[in-house]
């Protein structure tokens, strides 16, 4: 029996199996992870190859991955989001291929991954996408020339950064080994698989079960060369490696025990073959996989025939035929066993019947071989052509290097002649540049000083104007409201009708609110401590004043307080932005609580204001207040954005990068 194609490409996946309940918990937890990503926060669930034909299981994994991809659209573009998107596309293509029933979809998704990785110039995921595409053309389309071309393309990507991507070399050699097996080049296959095993340990994160797959493939190549002792050695190495791992899939064990039984049959060690073949049949029965079980039954029938147990051979061969009427190899084996067994029992009629069936099936198989022979020849020719082209390319590169060396030596001679004359010129230019550099430095210092004076004058002018407006509000508007209030209070409410008394009380309450808000506005327009103390102290004073209103409870928090001072311009604009946002909360949010948070880290300062109100309406997002806030943020090099709160309400964020902060000279 050949190496099964679904076992050849088991890259980047776990071999662990879990109970159904644990799988459901893992799938649900993976789908509903929190709405934020970290650098390594996009792990995918393992694929259980024992359930590769379970369409419900495969579709559930695909649906969960599509949901995760849609969830990425909610985030701002970043390298982390791009990497997560590529990882999910890689997992989707892998599930499509491994699930057996969606293999054409695997090519479509793998091409999506490759195009995205090329746009983002991500070599790692370009390699991963090409590996998926290569496996499709090698195993599904059996287009070996195309597969060889793709492997050479992967190799060229690896060679751009060999220290980083050398862990993929073992996969290239493995792929070329499987292509060599498919076209009957067993000597080349042995060489490729040996190189793959030698490179395997470079990939520290890979599952050791892949090493078992490589030894199994190498054993198959030795079997093709009729070196059965070496084939047996590597099959046993693969079996020992599997048994050292925990929770290995049953299908892995089933394939390998069948291979061991077959190689013992070829060595006529029938007693040693029977336990492995029976174990393989039991494994396939657990998985309800009739096709591969028929293969193991046919091989077991060969073992019984070799031991002259003809009745058992006949019964087992008929079981194999009952479970398989599609795949030629086990059918031919079963027909051959039945023919020979009936001949030994002198049942010539049945022997002749099965001999005719064998001849007809053999003729069909030969037709298929004839049809694929031209494809194999073309693959062999293309591989030789590519190897020849590589050799020519390497020779050309070598000659170019020699020519470049000669040109370099000639150039060195010319440079040596110019160095003496150029040295004087360079020295003169250096002195001249030094002179102008000193002048430019003094000019820059003067400009920075002048700019600082202009900025301070601008802030001083803004402060004077805000103070004037605050004075006008306090002296005129507040006095006028106070006089109006006294006039209202002079009215005798007892003589009014109930309706008019209610209007009188409402009007008086509105006047009280107006007096309070004018007083708060005049005080907040120009906090004197803002120019004398840090931003945190000024905001603490603002919170105390806001809490006097009584509608919304404000609080102030901070993380990682930084000692670096803010320039007056930055401090002034941040304070005004916070004041405007808090005023919006009081006027529109209908919130019970609001929190201002200052967060310093290595990248800069973040100011977050979050409330539990009704959220931002579409009309408010286009208002003049938010437009002015964005203008102030851009003026100091900061970013401003709004988003829904963690539970409800609104969260406003201002981020000031360290490099853009205008500190005093």
Image (cartoon, rainbow, N blue to C red):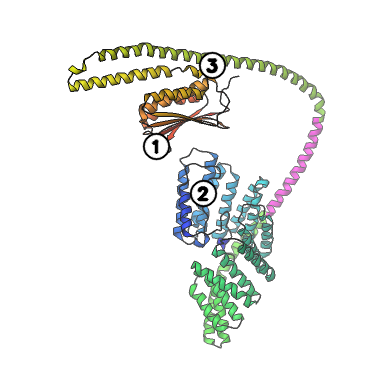
Q: Give the range drawn in magenta.
A: 387-415
In the image as oriented, which residue stretches furthest toward the front?
494
Q: What element carries label 3?
A: helix
- CB under 8 Å between callouts 2 and 3? no
- First in sequence: mark 1 vs mark 2: 2
Residue of label 2: 89
- Distance from Cα at disc 2 to Cα at disc 3: 51 Å
Residue of label 1: 648
Give neighbour class at mark 1: few <14, some 14-19, many 20+ (Cα, 10 Å): few
- First in sequence: mark 2 vs mark 3: 2
What is the x, y in percent for residue 140? 54, 59
Q: Is mark 1 on a helix, strand or loop?
A: loop
**Could you say which is closer to the camera, residue 109 or residue 623?**
623
Q: Is residue 554 above or below residue 120?
A: above
Task: Indicate whether residue 390 is drawn in magenta.
Answer: yes
In the image as oriented, which residue stretches furthest toward the bottom?
346
- Indicate which label's residue lies in the foreground, 3 or 1: 1
**Could you say which is closer to the camera, residue 629 or residue 197?**
629
Residue of label 3: 455
Q: Is residue 507 above or below residue 121?
A: above
Type of secondary structure dominating the magenta stretch: helix
- Kindly tell me whether residue 11 is visible in this rendering: yes
- First in sequence: mark 3 vs mark 1: 3
Q: Is residue 234 left or right of residue 299?
A: right
Name the disc covering residue 558, or none.
none
Q: Is residue 608 left or right of residue 10?
A: left
Q: Is residue 27 left or right of residue 565?
A: left
């Amino acid at each position: 029996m050949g190496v099964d194609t679904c076992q050849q490409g088991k890259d980047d996946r776990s071999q662990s199996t879990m109970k159904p309940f644990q799988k459901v918990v893992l799938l649900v937890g993976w789908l509903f992870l929190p709405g934020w990503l970290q650098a390594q926060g996009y792990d995918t669930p393992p694929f259980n190859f024992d359930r590769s034909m379970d369409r419900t299981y495969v579709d559930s994994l695909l649906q969960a991955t599509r949901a995760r991809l849609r969830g990425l659209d909610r985030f701002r573009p970043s390298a982390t989001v791009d990497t997560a998107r590529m990882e999910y596309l890689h997992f989707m293509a892998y599930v499509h291929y491994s699930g057996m029933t969606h293999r054409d979809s695997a090519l479509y998704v793998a091409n999506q991954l490759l195009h995205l990785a090329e746009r983002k110039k991500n070599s790692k995921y370009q390699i991963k996408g090409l590996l998926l595409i290569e496996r499709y053309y090698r195993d599904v389309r059996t287009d070996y020339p195309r597969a060889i071309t793709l492997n050479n393309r992967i190799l060229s990507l690896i060679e751009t950064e060999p220290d980083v991507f050398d862990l993929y070399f073992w996969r290239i050699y493995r792929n070329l080994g499987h292509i060599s097996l498919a076209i009957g080049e067993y000597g080349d296959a042995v060489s490729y698989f040996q190189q793959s095993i030698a490179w395997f340990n470079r990939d520290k994160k890979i599952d050791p079960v892949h090493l078992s797959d490589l030894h199994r493939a190498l054993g198959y190549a030795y079997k093709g060369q009729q070196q059965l002792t070496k084939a047996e050695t590597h099959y046993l190495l693969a079996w020992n490696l599997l048994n050292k791992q925990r929770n290995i899939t049953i299908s892995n064990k089933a394939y390998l025990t069948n291979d061991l039984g077959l190689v013992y049959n070829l060595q006529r060690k029938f007693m040693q073959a029977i336990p492995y073949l029976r174990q393989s049949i039991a494994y396939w029965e657990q998985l309800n996989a009739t096709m591969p079980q028929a293969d193991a039954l046919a091989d077991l029938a060969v073992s019984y025939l070799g031991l002259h147990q003809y009745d058992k051979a006949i019964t087992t061969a008929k079981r194999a035929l009952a479970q398989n009427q599609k795949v030629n190899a086990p059918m031919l084996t079963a027909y051959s066993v039945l023919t020979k067994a009936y001949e030994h029992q002198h049942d010539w009629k049945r022997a002749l019947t099965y001999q005719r069936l064998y001849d007809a099936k053999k003729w069909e198989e030969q037709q298929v071989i004839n049809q694929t022979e031209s494809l194999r020849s073309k693959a062999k020719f293309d591989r030789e052509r590519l190897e020849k082209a590589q050799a020519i390319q390497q020779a050309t590169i070598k000659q170019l290097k020699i020519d470049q060396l000669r040109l370099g030596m000639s150039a060195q001679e010319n440079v040596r002649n110019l160095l003496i004359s150029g040295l004087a010129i360079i020295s003169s230019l250096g002195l001249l540049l030094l002179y102008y550099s000193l002048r430019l430095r003094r000019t820059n210092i003067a400009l920075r000083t002048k700019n600082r004076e202009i900025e301070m004058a601008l802030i001083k002018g803004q402060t004077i104007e805000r103070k004037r407006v605050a004075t006008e509000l306090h002296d005129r508007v507040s006095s006028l409201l106070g006089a109006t209030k006294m006039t209202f209070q002079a009215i005798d409410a007892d003589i009014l009708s109930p309706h008019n008394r209610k209007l009188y009380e409402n009007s008086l309450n509105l006047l009280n609110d107006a007096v309070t808000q004018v007083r708060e506005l005049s005080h907040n327009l120009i906090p004197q401590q803002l120019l004398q103390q840090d931003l945190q102290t000024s905001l603490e004073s603002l919170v105390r004043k806001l809490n006097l209103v009584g509608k919304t409870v404000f609080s102030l928090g901070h993380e990682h307080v930084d000692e670096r001072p803010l320039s007056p311009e930055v401090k002034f604009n941040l304070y005004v932005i916070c004041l405007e946002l808090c005023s919006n909360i009081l006027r529109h949010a209908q919130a019970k609580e609001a929190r201002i948070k200052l967060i310093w880290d290595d990248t800069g300062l973040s100011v977050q204001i979050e409330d539990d109100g009704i959220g931002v309406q579409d009309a408010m997002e286009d208002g003049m207040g938010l437009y002015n806030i964005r203008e102030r943020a851009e003026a100091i090099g900061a970013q401003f954005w709004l988003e829904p709160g963690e539970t409800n309400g609104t969260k406003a964020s201002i981020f000031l990068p360290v490099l853009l902060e205008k500190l005093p000279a």
